[in-house]
Amino acid sequence: MNDKPTPAMFGRLALRREEPWWVAYYALADTMDRAIEIGRMRMRSAEESPGLKNGFMSLMQNVVTHMVQDTTGARLEWPNAPVPAPDHERKE
């Protein structure tokens, strides 16, 4: 059994397309209500440069990790791949 803290225990990193931006939020596990914006980059840059996109995602994970660690003392373990947004939050 893995008892290491995971982001889902404390909230999540939510990345949303809000043209012309790609916006990162710290949000509770099941809602975007009261989500906190923690960063943004130009959507075009994310789409045109996989390196920038991955770097931004990594930076935002580190921001969330530090926010949670500062508040709870827990050091998060992130999954190897992004987890899709809940169905009720997806734009079709």
Image (spheres, helix red, strand yellow):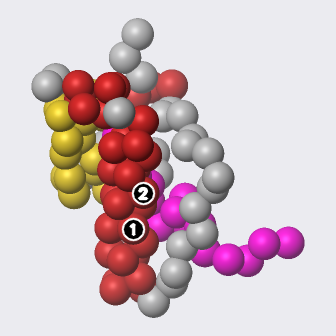
Q: Quadrant of the N terminus?
A: bottom right
Looking at the image, is 59 positioned above or below residue 34?
below
Q: CA distance from mark 2 to mark 1?
A: 6 Å
Task: Indicate the quadrant where residue 47 lies.
Answer: top left
Residue type, mark 2 in image:
Ser
**Residue 27, visible in the rendered structure:** no
Q: Which residue is mark 2?
A: 58
Q: Quadrant of the C terminus?
A: top left
Task: Indicate the quadrant where residue 19 lies.
Answer: top left
Of 43 and 69, nearer the camera is: 43
**Residue found 23% across the figure and 25% down from its top:** 44
Q: Secondary structure at mark 2?
A: helix
> Are the residues at dot 2 and dot 1 in contact (C-beta closer than 8 Å)?
yes
**Residue 81, visible in the rendered structure:** yes
**Residue found 54% across the figure and 73% down from its top:** 76
Of 26 and 65, nearer the camera is: 65
**Residue found 38% across the figure and 52% down from its top:** 55
**Residue 23 - label:** none
Does residue 4 show up magenta in the picture?
yes
Q: Position of residue 5 (x, y in %)?
A: 61, 74
Range shown magenta: 1-15
Q: Position of residue 37 (x, y in %)?
A: 19, 52
Q: Which residue is mark 1?
A: 62
Q: Residues within 10 Å of mark 1 (few under 14, many from 20)?
A: some
Does residue 49 show up magenta in the picture?
no
Residue type, mark 1 in image:
Asn
Q: Secondary structure at mark 1?
A: helix
Looking at the image, is 45 positioned above or below residue 92?
below
**Residue found 34% across the figure and 58% down from its top:** 60
